[in-house]
Image: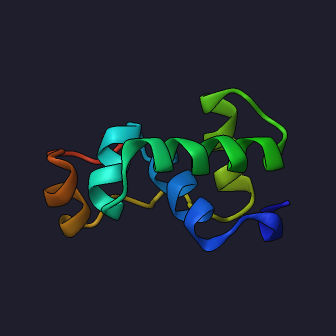
């Protein structure tokens, strides 16, 4: 499952699992929001879900992220967030 994801799809899934919106992830990755949305949609299709909550559970299960993962300081600055998705 996770091995089917491209590196970019993995990045997008990780950011989504940390609570980032498509626009925040786009700022972090320096991509257009539509590109991030496409990566997210393809990743969700590959993982067999259309639910964001399940995407987060799968990201943890597949070790794309973990419950202790947080946005880096650089990611927070780029996205404009003060806290990561777990706070």
Residue 13 as seen in the image, left or right of residue 77: right
Residue 85: name its quadrant. top left
Could you tell me residue 51's position as x and y percent? 68, 27
Q: Quadrant of the N terminus?
A: bottom right
Residue at (65% x, 53% y) in the render: 59
Q: Quadrant of the C terminus?
A: top left
Residue at (18% x, 58% y) in the render: 78
Could you tell me residue 13's position as x and y percent? 57, 52
Placement of 51 over or under 22, stated as above or below: above
Label tally: 0
Q: Nearest the camera: 33 or 63?
A: 33
Residue at (36% x, 57% y) in the render: 31
| Residue 67 seen from this side | no
Residue 33: name its quadrant. top left
Residue at (61% x, 72% y) in the render: 7
| Residue 62 seen from this side | yes
Q: Nearest the camera: 12 or 14?
A: 12
Could you tell me residue 56's position as x and y percent? 61, 42
Residue 43 as seen in the image, left or right of residue 34: right
Placement of 60 over or under 49, stated as above or below: below
Residue 41 as seen in the image, left or right of residue 21: right
Could you tell me residue 81's position as x and y percent? 18, 45
Residue 32 as seen in the image, left or right of residue 2: left
Color encoding of the figure? rainbow
Residue 83: name its quadrant. top left
């Amino acid at each position: 499952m996770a091995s089917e994801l491209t590196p970019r799809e993995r990045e997008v899934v990780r950011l989504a699992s940390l609570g980032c919106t498509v626009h925040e992830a786009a700022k972090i990755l320096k991509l257009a929001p539509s590109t991030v949305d496409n990566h997210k949609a393809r990743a969700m299709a590959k993982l067999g879900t259309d639910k964001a909550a399940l995407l987060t559970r799968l990201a943890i299960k597949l070790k794309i992220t973990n419950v202790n993962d947080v946005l880096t300081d650089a990611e927070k600055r780029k996205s404009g967030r003060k806290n990561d998705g777990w706070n």
